[in-house]
Amino acid sequence: RRHKPGPKGPSAELIAAIGVLWACIAATRRSWGGMVCGALLGLMGKESGVVVLALIPLTLWVTRRRWWDVALVSVAVVCFGLWWAGGFQALAHRGHAVEMQTTAIEWFFLQGAAAYRLIGQGIYPVGLTVDADIDVITKTGQSVAVIALAVLGRLAWALRTSSPLIAFGLAWLLLSLIPRLIVQTPRSYLNAHQFYLPSLGLFIAAVSAWDTWQAPHA
């Protein structure tokens, strides 16, 4: 009997984002069943859902759960992550011939530029297009984009105490981008539907920043 393929493209990315969000909301309520079900949905939706293994412990830490809760979940996700990583490369190219488009470092910088573009458009939506030509971005532009991502990471660390929700949103954004920066997807740089999951972090950071700015003026 012919095998029926699973969801692809935008629908798969959306399923992964829903699953990860479900798992993290469940983490805020210490619902272990919800965390497991959400994580499984995210992982089955799309390989990018693997970031749930980092976002669940992060959510538990930000919501100030007991240290042993965070430790227990962290150990579990590390063990699962080690098992998952063994097949992650093949899974990332499921249904495709494994073809490296460029070197790892070149891919990192190109994807960094694509991510920087989508973050900018998430804040100020101009120049929207279905398939941006990332290859035309200069090496200087790519370097600036990667530096900007590093600055966001440093900002998240600096705000971890004074503005934990902003830091959480930025950390969510950057952690969700890591697989995209490492694993090469044949014939495809980071695009809008692949940005569903990182955009949740951008939204959390933006809303938290707005609330922080509004508080003294209330």
Image (cartoon, rainbow, N blue to C red):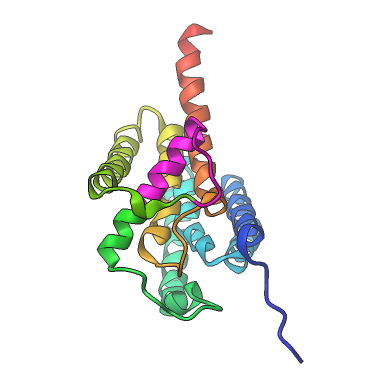
> What secondary structure characterizes most of the magenta part?
helix
Front residue of 102/77: it is 102
Front residue of 205/160: it is 205
Identify the image quadrant of residue 88: bottom left
- The range drawn in magenta is 112-131
Residue 83 in view, yes or no? no
Q: Is residue 178 above or below residue 216?
A: below
Q: Is residue 3 above or below residue 78?
A: below
Where in the figure is residue 50, as x and y percent of width and height? 49, 63
Front residue of 210/143: it is 143
Identify the image quadrant of residue 105: bottom left
Front residue of 120/127: it is 127
Q: What is the residue that sits farthest to the top in this orientation?
A: 217
Q: Is residue 188 left or right of residue 7?
A: left
x 59%, y 53%: residue: 17
x 28%, y 61%: residue: 106
Q: Is residue 183 left or right of residue 30?
A: left
Q: What is the residue that sits farthest to the right in this orientation?
A: 1
Where in the figure is residue 132, as x and y percent of width and height? 47, 49
